[in-house]
Image (cartoon, helix red, strand yellow):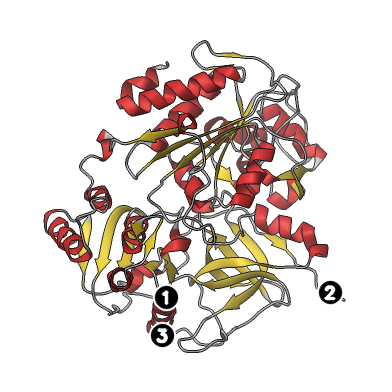
Amino acid sequence: MSQTALTYSDDQAEAHDRIAAALREVGVDLDEGMLTPPREGKSRVMAVVGKAGSGKTLLLAALYRALEEAGVDVVSGDWEGRRRRDRRTLAILAPTNKAASVLRMRGVPATTIHRILYTPVYDPEYERIAEWLAGNGDKPEIEGLTEEALERARLFYGTHKSIPGALAAAGLRGSDFITGWKRREEPLDIGFIDEASMLDEKQYEDLQEIFPTLLLFGDPAQLAPVNQSGAMVFDGLPAPAKLTLNRIHRQDADNPILDLAHALGDPEVGFQDFERLVEQKAAQDERVQWAQRVEVDLMARSPVLVWRNATRIRLINAFRAVHGAPETELLEGEPLICDGLELPLKHRKKRLDLEARGLIKGAQVIYLGAGRKPGFSRLHVMGAEDPRVSAASIVKIEKPDEEEPFIPFAARMGATFLHGAAVTIHKAQGSQWPDVQVFAPDIYAAARMGRTEAGQPLWKRLAYVAITRAEERLHWVVRNRLSKPTGALRIDDLRAAPAPLELEAEEEA
């Protein structure tokens, strides 16, 4: 076992050894750093499961580094290079942009499942730069690019391992070097899937077709995907293939948010008992806040988490009202949630363009203003690797006690959006924010109903998912009140990015 084992707990070390043994069976020896070509007919699915703070991400990151050191090529979804028969590959995936970005911030080159289902088509001229950066070719001479520009690309790639980022550092735009997207035709090799509790059966089947060796990382205490009867895809795996991490890792041992999350596992703790624990933690540690109202300033970047749809709609309308947003248009800086794509089958290429750029169902975006064409919006996709995009949009603002949403403007077809100042806890899975506001009256309503899911009180699952979305500070909101904003909505805090690529949903004649 590698030196990373020195930081492992006992259960992490055991999981590492069992995964290393499974990889050795398919020709990847982490201990000796030796690879043999992929073999037909060898397939395997394993899962690492554990609650928040048990060290799943630390184990994933250590396994990634060990595979990279052994010579396995990491496929990021932005470019793959020339195929070799003996090539061994690893892709690290997450169901959402935000979940992938959390891993990237920890040094793990993760991308979304959609970005691996589709592969970019590069302009042949600029693909020569990608081959050179990846060590598969000589330094090219490209008309219009200076030696200094190529050097900037080389330095960027050496640090970030991103071909699009390196080409952008050379002064190119995405529309210069990526000419389109296509559905993946060739399988890959090894796949790590984070936040696997969010996978539905169809996604799971797609991933099994692509990856002969699949390792799932998931939290069994979260909410199962809708319409799956409380089951998660790893629940049906045989016991030897499911590795459980039970111990809270030492780096997280003094985290009051994780203390609260694990307290929910005690069957003797009722809702009132849990709220007393929250209040006690708030008195001891500023990372937990006993909040008397929803802070509207936080809603612009991290939505209030609720259970009931009616609560979500009321909070959204209150957010827009205190900011003076007119009914007929959106303000720059308003948060939105992608609710899917309304495109006919004949516009499959446009669907691939949108999804590959991060506009997948559940994606969180910030509205930057109207696009150059009627019905288009300029958007910042939170957590996406190339976040700026301009897309044909259908924006729906739901109203309390009204069945039909108000649509301030819309293209005939394109990406559909709901407002994102508040979201249901189900939709928040896979995302994390520095500050998270949980609307406690909704959790109490679930507790009073007495519903269960997979043998666990529903309110406990809701509370667990909601509070573990907080990276730094949890706000447990106990009153149905909203603060006033301290300033106007803003977009200057969003990082600069290359010029947006117009993704046009062509209208029917």
Q: What element carries label 1?
A: helix
Asked if labels 2 and 3 touch by Cβ distance under 8 angstroms, the answer is no
- Give above or below for 134 relative to 382: above
Asked if labels 3 and 1 touch by Cβ distance under 8 angstroms, the answer is no
- Give above or below for 94 relative to 484: above
- Give above or below for 102 relative to 279: above
Crowd around label 1: few <14 · some 14–19 · many ≥20 (10 Å): many
Q: Which residue is drawn at the image coordinates 48% and 41% (left, top)?
A: 104
Q: Is mark 3 on a helix, strand or loop?
A: helix
Crowd around label 2: few <14 · some 14–19 · many ≥20 (10 Å): few
- Of residues 412 and 15, the one nearer the viewer is 15
The image position of residue 377, as x and y in percent, is 63, 71
The image position of residue 484, as x and y in percent, is 30, 79
The image position of residue 47, as x and y in percent, is 48, 36
Q: Name the residue under label 2.
A: 508
Q: Mark 1 points at which residue?
A: 312
The amino acid marked with disc number 3 is Ala
In terms of sequence position, does the residue under pointer 3 or pointer 2 come before the other? 3
Left or right: 179 with respect to 266? right
Q: Name the residue under label 3.
A: 321
Q: Can residue 107 be seen in this view?
A: no
